[in-house]
Amino acid sequence: MRKYPEPFINLITVFNSLPGIGIKTAERLAFSVFEWDEDKIRTFSEVITAVNSDLDFCQTCGNIAEKKSLCVFCADSSRKKELICVVENPAQAMAVESGGVFNGLYHILGGKLAPLQGTNAENLNIDSLKERVLNSGVSEVIIALGHDVESRATSMYITSLLEPYDVVVSIPARGLPAGSDITYADPATLAAAFTGRTTAEENYS
């Protein structure tokens, strides 16, 4: 790294640690922040601090929410509570929302099965999904995890777990590119995939 004062290097390092931010972009962001006035820097600092003090995971689904509160979807009485879409993270839930065809609730797993990286079923938000199916009148669970190897293994595991219960388990149609993360799919593709979803039994039999 170039010879900057240590506080400036620390700022670059923080930006560089964010997903998709390379060292040159981190440098540009650091220079931009350095040029802010005191009020703007104070506001930025307060916003970042509030992430830890004011935000948490939804008590029901695991989505992002204000502390000790339900997320915007679980708190919305107009959503179809009998329909649950399972996704890996909050960003994927927002991507599904952008399709404009899903009006149910979400369930955030917090990852996907990856035993080689130490992520097993007990590390994911799976037991609470089973509890919701058992106790919340759920009639359909849509597993929207993408099509890479880990996502497929996770989908199959959840399908097997829910097999004994009176619930339809479905998968979005294959309009989504193989190996892709649904976070980056365009809204039209997601809408078509959800509209044309098929049962997990058809996919994995």
Image (cartoon, rainbow, N blue to C red):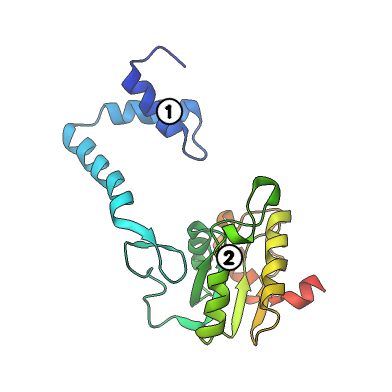
- Residue tagged 2: 188
Pointer 1 local density, CA inside 10 Å: few below 14, some 14–19, many at least 20: some
Pointer 2 local density, CA inside 10 Å: few below 14, some 14–19, many at least 20: few
Q: Quadrant of residue 32?
A: top left
Quadrant position of the C terminus in the picture: bottom right
Q: Residue at x 62, y 76 (%)?
A: 195
Amino acid type at circle 2 is Ala
Q: Residue at x 62, y 66 (%)?
A: 144
Task: Tell me which label, 1 or 2, sits earlier in the chain.
Answer: 1
The disc at residue 13 is 1
| Left or right of 38 on screen, residue 125 | right
Residue situated in front as seen by the camera: 192 or 52: 52
Q: Residue at x 40, y 12 (%)?
A: 3
Amino acid type at circle 1 is Thr
Q: Position of residue 25 (x, y in %)?
A: 45, 30
- Disc 2, SS: helix
Frontmost of labels 1 and 2 is 1
What's the distance in space between the residues labelled 1 and 2, CA to CA? 37 Å
Q: Position of residue 165 (x, y in %)?
A: 65, 84
Q: Position of residue 181 (x, y in %)?
A: 62, 54
| Residue furthest to the right | 205
| Residue furthest to the left | 39
- Where 149 falls versus 165 (above or below)? above
| Left or right of 35 on screen, residue 23 | right
- Disc 1, SS: helix
Q: Position of residue 190 (x, y in %)?
A: 59, 66
- Where 36 falls versus 78 (above or below)? above
- Where 58 falls versus 54 (above or below)? below
Q: Are marks 1 and 2 in contact (CB under 8 Å)?
A: no
| Residue furthest to the front | 122
